Image: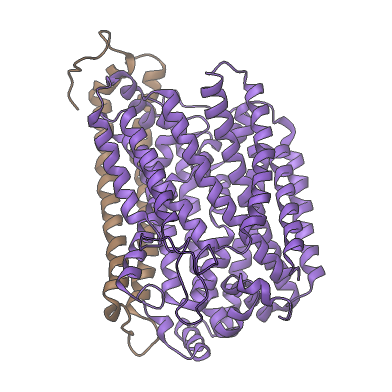
Chain colours: A brown, B purple
């Protein structure tokens, strides 16, 4: 985002000052760099599965090694696995990396240091 | 529908008194809990958000309770039993959708809002028009979702209590509605949350026991279980995609449309969003979603086994002939496994599911009406919190009455269609504006109104002119498959059952178009406040009670 605010109120608010700060900018960058690519990834993976389920039915209906388990079922179960994995990765990242920085910034704001 | 008429001749499975007895025990236990926790239900934060004092794990369990409705329990198990793989597709969309809530919505919403979705949407836009639009779309989603639950109650009654005439079912629907009003009035959000927690635990444990039981009977061999289902069905088509959605090009696109609505709808469901306000912080909101994802995912894995288990042990012919049709697959499987007692437990859990979900929906709608429409729009914010909560309580009674009347009227309607409609409205009318207002600085009031009203109206209009309302005829029997049973009435021109593939992208585009067409001054200071608060939690609402 640009740092000059055309047409904004003449006096900069505290929140705008925080928003411009390097600490906040890097926090936001870290957040978006994690969640945006991850969102794109799981949506593409999900729609790939959905499209294949209706347009690649022969492939998805292929039996694996003489059993009744089909490629489609395995793909479907992998959607469960990927959801659990992304959930765990995000929770770990947020708990270990994000929270401390967000809390520090919040305390600075609430104590009026920024 | 078909089941209700045939129920008179069909043998009623199970012991009605055991079913009623176990359900009554659930009601008594939950009522005691609701009365015990409702001691300090005074402030708006208590009534609307349970004092924001639930832990992440408790709230996550309650979210699973809210989300695993009768449609997902009875509907998905039945769909897998009859359609196999194509039934399984539903559950995947319902689960993956939670990642949208986890990554993009839950924590940011908790940090910036107070009680409703509209709090967040109107944060940096013009309060009154945006609140009104958000409240209307909240009420629309809740209305269709509520109708689905109440409509399901009628079919369930036919199967489980042996009540087969429509008047008798109407009485039971009224009892369910009256109980729900009592829970919500007495317990507020806190009581409702505890009902959800108890119900989710029962549901997941019950489904888990049945799953293990089915697997034991088949030597923990999933392939063997599926073979038994194939033998019973007489076709192996249930192992492959295509039974339901592979019929034609239209059904294929219909499936993709449904897939889109499911994955983007969850994070726009108002009764899910309000749950994020019941915890003390964004960190707890995150924990809630993590717990909910594990529980919901586990549950859908159970339904895969239960669905094929019902196909193998009960068989599609018996399921189709039973009162309630596909929805009876899970209860019939319970009867086949554990006789009257297990059926009684599962029946009670299914009822509890309807009761709890209806309670969660009602408190959401009441909160939205009292907080967004009454306090902010009619009274322009000049109302005491007590007055607002009083209005919310009256709204609960009104919504309960609407749900009872609507449920009696909609008895026998297709549950899955009503739920899919609710998801589609949530995805088209709510999600684009939620995403834009959180992440797009240039977004303004005009864009929000274009997107919300555009998404809401286009979805409802396309549904009205779709085959689910009129003109869909079963090619084999010649019977109507639409809402309007008279096959000579046919005014449909939109080919798909689910309009999501048109209306969801449309709503996203309208948000951009509306934004650029308006000359509205942007408010960089409000956006800065929203952005900083949403990520850091500065100034977020604190817990009020413990």
Q: Is residue B25 above or below residue A97?
A: below
Pick the residue in front: B389 or B130: B130
Question: Image point 27% across, 64% down: which residue?
Answer: A48
Q: Is residue A11 above or below residue B544?
A: above
Dividing the picture into quarters, in which one does residue B50 lie?
Answer: top right
Which residue lies at the image location 76% right of the left edge and 47% below the top edge?
B31
Occupied quadrant, residue B154: bottom right
> At x 57% / y 62%, what residue is drawn?
B413
- Image coordinates of residue A87 in percent, x first then y, are 39, 52
**Between B460 and B252, the one nearer to me in the picture:** B460
Q: Is residue B249 visible?
A: yes
What x and y, as percent, mark residue A27? Answer: 28, 32
In this rendering, position of residue B493 left or right of residue B356: left
The number of numbered badges drawn on the structure is 0
The residue lying toward the viewer, choosing from B85 and B31, is B85
Asked whether the viewer can see residue B543, the reply is: no
Quadrant location of the C terminus of chain A?
A: top left
- Residue extending furthest top? A10
Left or right: residue B333 versus residue A55 is right
Q: Name the outermost residue toward the front.
A: B488
Residue B236 x/y as whole percent: 42, 87
As drawn, is B145 to the left or to the right of B429? right
Horizontal placement of B545 versus B226: left or right? Answer: right
Residue B286 vertical position relative to residue B464 in the rendered view, above or below: above
Residue B12 placement (x, y as % from top left): 74, 77
Quadrant including the N terminus of chain A: top left
């Amino acid at each position: 985002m640009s740092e000059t605010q055309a047409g904004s109120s003449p006096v900069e608010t505290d929140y705008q000052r925080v928003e411009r700060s390097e600490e906040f900018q890097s926090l936001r960058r870290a957040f978006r760099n994690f969640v945006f690519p991850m969102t794109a990834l799981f949506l593409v993976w999900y729609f790939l599965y959905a499209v294949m389920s209706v347009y690649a039915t022969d492939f998805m209906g292929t039996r694996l090694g003489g059993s009744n388990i089909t490629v489609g079922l395995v793909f479907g179960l992998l959607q469960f696995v990927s959801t659990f994995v992304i959930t765990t990765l995000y929770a770990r990242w947020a708990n270990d990396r994000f929270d401390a920085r967000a809390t520090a910034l919040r305390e600075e704001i609430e104590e009026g240091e920024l | 529908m078909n089941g209700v008429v045939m129920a008179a001749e069909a043998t009623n499975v199970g012991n009605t008194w055991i079913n009623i007895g176990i359900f009554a025990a659930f009601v008594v236990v939950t009522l005691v809990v609701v009365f015990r926790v409702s001691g300090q239900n005074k402030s708006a934060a208590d009534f609307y958000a349970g004092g924001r004092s639930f832990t992440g794990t408790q709230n996550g369990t309650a979210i699973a309770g809210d989300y695993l409705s009768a449609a997902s329990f009875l509907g998905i198990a039945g769909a897998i039993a009859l359609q196999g793989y194509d039934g399984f597709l539903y559950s995947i969309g319902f689960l993956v959708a939670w990642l949208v809530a986890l990554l993009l919505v839950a924590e940011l919403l908790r940090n910036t809002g107070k009680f409703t979705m509209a709090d967040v949407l109107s944060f940096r836009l013009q309060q009154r028009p945006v609140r009104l639009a958000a409240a209307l779309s909240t009420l629309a989603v809740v209305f269709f979702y509520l109708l689905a639950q109440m409509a399901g109650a009628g079919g369930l009654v036919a199967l489980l209590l042996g009540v087969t005439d429509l008047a008798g079912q109407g009485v039971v629907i009224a009892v369910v509605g009256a109980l729900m009003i009592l829970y919500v009035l007495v317990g507020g959000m806190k009581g409702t949350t505890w009902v959800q927690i108890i119900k989710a635990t029962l549901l997941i444990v019950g489904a888990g026991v049945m799953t293990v039981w089915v697997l034991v009977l088949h030597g923990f061999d999933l392939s063997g279980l599926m073979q038994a289902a194939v033998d019973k069905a007489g076709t192996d088509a249930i192992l492959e995609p295509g039974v339901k959605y592979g019929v034609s090009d239209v059904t294929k696109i219909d499936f993709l449309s449904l897939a889109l609505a499911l994955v983007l709808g969850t994070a726009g469901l108002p009764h899910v969003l309000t749950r994020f306000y019941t915890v003390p912080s964004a960190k707890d909101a995150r924990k809630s979603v993590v717990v909910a994802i594990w529980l919901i995912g586990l549950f859908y894995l159970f339904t895969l086994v239960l669905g094929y288990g019902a196909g193998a042990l009960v068989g599609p012919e018996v399921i189709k002939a039973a009162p309630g049709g596909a929805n009876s697959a899970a209860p019939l499987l319970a009867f086949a496994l554990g006789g009257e007692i297990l059926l009684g437990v599962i029946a009670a859990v299914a009822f509890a599911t309807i009761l709890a979900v209806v309670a969660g929906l009602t408190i959401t709608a009441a909160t939205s009406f009292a907080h967004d429409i009454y306090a902010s729009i009619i009274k322009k914010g000049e109302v005491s919190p007590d007055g607002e909560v009083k209005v919310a309580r009256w709204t609960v009674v009104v919504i309960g009455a609407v749900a009872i009347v609507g449920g009696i009227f909609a008895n026998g309607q297709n549950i899955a269609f009503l739920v899919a409609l609710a998801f589609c409205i949530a995805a088209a009318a709510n999600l684009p504006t939620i995403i834009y207002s959180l992440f797009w600085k240039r977004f303004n009031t005009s864009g929000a109104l274009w997107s919300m009203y555009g998404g809401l109206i286009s979805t409802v209009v396309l549904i009205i002119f779709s085959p689910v309302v009129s003109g869909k005829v079963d090619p084999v029997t010649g019977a109507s498959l639409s809402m309007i049973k008279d096959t000579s009435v046919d005014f449909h021109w939109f080919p798909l059952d689910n309009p999501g593939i048109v209306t969801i992208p449309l709503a996203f585009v309208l948000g951009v178009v509306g934004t650029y067409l308006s000359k509205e001054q942007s408010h960089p200071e409000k956006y800065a406040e929203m952005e900083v608060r949403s990520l850091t939690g500065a100034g977020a609402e604190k817990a009020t009670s413990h």
